[in-house]
Image (cartoon, helix red, strand yellow):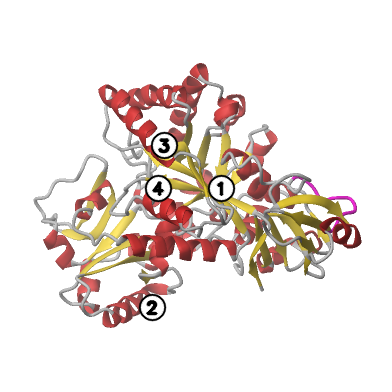
């Protein structure tokens, strides 16, 4: 039982539209019992109700992050966190400071460094040797598709000029073939068995930190995009179960079980059976603090990212002189494997959560979803494609017909340094301007959801919403990226609330309606009264999860 509560502001967004007159919700026993003006909500909540009033603010549903890695992000915040570093020298200084503060650690691990801070996006092992000589260092980059490692780390893993690249990744090398210091995609796994494994207590602490951090931004539910072990990161399942059992999880969580790479068609039945067992072990766990954890999806990482030429493209990447190369990227699953595993997963009751960044990966993913829809109702399962950076507009009508949701990471849809310095030269001007086709998908009837992919980028929904509406990075003087692909504020807010709740199967949340779970986020101002260029300044003033105030400024 929770204390009755009134949450009020200047106006109210239902999750689909601005309410014509309401500005407050009344809450009892974790549920919304009334929506109306402040006096009406007070009366409905009853005597003794706590009143949380944000003058001038916007009351809305709690945000649902449809693609996030909380335990990983929380763990990085507690380790060598380079997220806020500005430039190569600042990054190296932070690494040195962390190493000095942890002189007895065998490994320095963490991440968040930015590719745009280094030439060609590839920092070198010898730079780490200069600042932390002799130390073993493993630092994932901000997009988590590559890792920067020290000479001692390379030596510990036996990675030298004779070491072959794995099938699903590559070792970046100097002209003489010696490893230069970065590992891409599957090559990150070459160190997986050597890295320190967080203890149970450390893993739960990372999840606790993630929940504290995310609810501070108004996030009251999420889809964990990888439930399983991946690139040296521990499977977060046990941390979630421990948090539920201890009454420490207060939010709704859906998990996407990790589909192992390197499988063949003959492995499909075994792999699907293993995923069903993992789902059954998790079950439908509900905790005393209002939290819930279950696995509804399977995460299929189909390709990589353009900056390392690992996103699967229909047309070749360009060389330094703007000429087509022979490289078009690759997918981690052969088409025949993807086409076999997708319907098998759907038949087992899983929705597909497919990482697809290049336009060829998007086309392959849509074909797999079509096959999945033949064996199970896609509307019930709610398949979705995440990231969707390079989409062939000719494929958008097929996406709409498939019923697949576009799971957008809108914060990236601008002319950031990484996009301009590393992406543009590889894809060329025409493809560059066509990236992140949000408005085209919305106009075609494709359902939209939104997520952050934190710790790849900020988990603050208002930062992503600001870019979705303006297509400009906050504070940038650059032109918008494809301004015709901007969303309206209403579209973006709906995607980050009702749209994400739907795709995550958080059917009791995502909307402010009587009878629904009282997950509420209150903005410190009314964004509908702000100029678009000021949206990035909106902040979450208060967060309510299952009727409990979990954040208040």
Q: Quadrant of residue 23?
A: bottom right
Q: Nearer the viewer, mark 4 or mark 3?
A: 3
- Residue at screen point 61% across, 44% down: 500
Q: Nearer the viewer, mark 1 or mark 3?
A: 3
The residue indicated by pointer 3 is 279
Which region of the structure is painted magenta? Answer: 16-23
Tag 3 or tag 1, which sits nearer the N-term? 3
- Residue at screen point 20% across, 43% down: 166
- SS for callout 4: loop
Tag 3 or tag 2, which sits nearer the N-term? 2
The residue indicated by pointer 1 is 433
In-front residue for pair 244/260: 244
Numbered tag placed on residue 305 in the rendering: 4
Tag 1 or tag 2, which sits nearer the N-term? 2
The residue indicated by pointer 2 is 90
- SS for callout 1: helix
Residue 82: percent from left, percent from top: 39, 70
Dominant SS type (magenta): loop
Q: Residues within 10 Å of mark 2 (few under 14, many from 20)?
A: some
**C-alpha span from label 4 to label 2:** 25 Å
Q: Residues within 10 Å of mark 3 (few under 14, many from 20)?
A: many
- SS for callout 2: helix
């Amino acid at each position: 039982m929770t204390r009755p509560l009134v949450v009020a502001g200047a106006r109210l967004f239902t999750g689909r539209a601005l309410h014509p007159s309401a500005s407050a919700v009344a809450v009892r026993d974790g549920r919304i019992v009334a929506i109306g003006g402040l006096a009406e909500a007070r009366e409905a909540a009853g005597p003794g109700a706590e009143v949380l009033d944000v003058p001038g603010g916007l009351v809305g549903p709690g945000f649902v992050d449809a693609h996030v890695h909380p335990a990983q992000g929380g763990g990085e915040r507690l380790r060598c966190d380079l997220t806020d570093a500005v430039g190569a020298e600042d990054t190296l200084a932070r690494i040195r400071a962390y190493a000095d503060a942890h002189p007895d650690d065998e490994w320095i691990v963490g991440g968040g460094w930015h590719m745009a801070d280094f030439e060609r996006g590839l920092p070198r092992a010898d730079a780490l040797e200069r600042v932390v000589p002799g130390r073993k260092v493993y630092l994932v980059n901000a997009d988590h598709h590559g890792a920067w490692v020290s000479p001692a780390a390379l030596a510990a893993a036996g990675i030298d000029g004779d070491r072959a690249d794995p099938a699903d990744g590559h070792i970046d090398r100097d002209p003489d073939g010696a490893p230069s210091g970065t590992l891409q995609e599957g090559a990150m796994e070459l160190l997986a068995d050597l890295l320190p494994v967080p203890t149970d207590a450390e893993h739960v602490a990372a999840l606790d930190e993630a929940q504290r951090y995310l609810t501070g931004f108004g996030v009251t539910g999420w889809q964990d995009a990888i439930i399983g072990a991946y690139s040296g990161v521990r499977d977060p399942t046990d941390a979630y179960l421990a948090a539920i059992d201890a009454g420490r999880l207060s939010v709704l969580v859906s998990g996407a079980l990790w589909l192992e790479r390197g499988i063949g068609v003959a492995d499909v039945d075994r792999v699907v059976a293993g995923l069903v067992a993992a789902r059954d072990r998790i079950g439908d766990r509900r905790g005393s603090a209002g939290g819930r954890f279950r696995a509804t999806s399977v995460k299929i990482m189909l390709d990589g990212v353009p900056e390392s030429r690992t996103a699967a493209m229909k047309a070749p990447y360009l060389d330094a002189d703007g000429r087509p190369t022979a490289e078009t990227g690759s997918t981690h699953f052969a088409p025949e494997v993807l086409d076999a595993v997708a319907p098998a997963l759907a038949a087992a009751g899983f929705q597909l959560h497919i990482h697809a960044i290049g336009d060829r990966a998007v086309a392959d993913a849509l074909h797999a979803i079509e096959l999945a829809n033949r064996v199970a109702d896609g509307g019930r399962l709610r398949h979705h494609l995440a990231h969707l950076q390079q989409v062939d507009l000719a494929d958008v009508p097929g996406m709409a017909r498939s019923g697949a949701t576009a799971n957008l990471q809108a914060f990236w849809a601008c002319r950031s340094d990484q996009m301009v310095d590393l992406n543009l030269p590889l894809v060329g001007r025409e493809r560059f301007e066509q990236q992140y086709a949000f408005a085209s998908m919305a106009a075609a009837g494709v359902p939209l959801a939104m997520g952050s992919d934190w710790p790849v980028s900020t988990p603050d929904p208002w930062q992503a919403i600001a870019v979705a509406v303006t297509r400009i990075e906050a504070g940038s003087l650059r032109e918008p990226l494809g301004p015709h692909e901007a969303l309206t504020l209403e579209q973006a807010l709906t995607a980050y609330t009702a749209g994400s709740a739907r795709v995550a199967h958080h059917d009791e949340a995502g909307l402010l309606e009587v009878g629904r779970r009282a997950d509420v986020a209150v903005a410190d101002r009314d964004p509908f009264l702000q100029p678009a260029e000021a949206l990035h300044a909106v902040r979450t003033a208060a967060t309510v999860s299952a009727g409990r105030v979990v954040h208040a400024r």
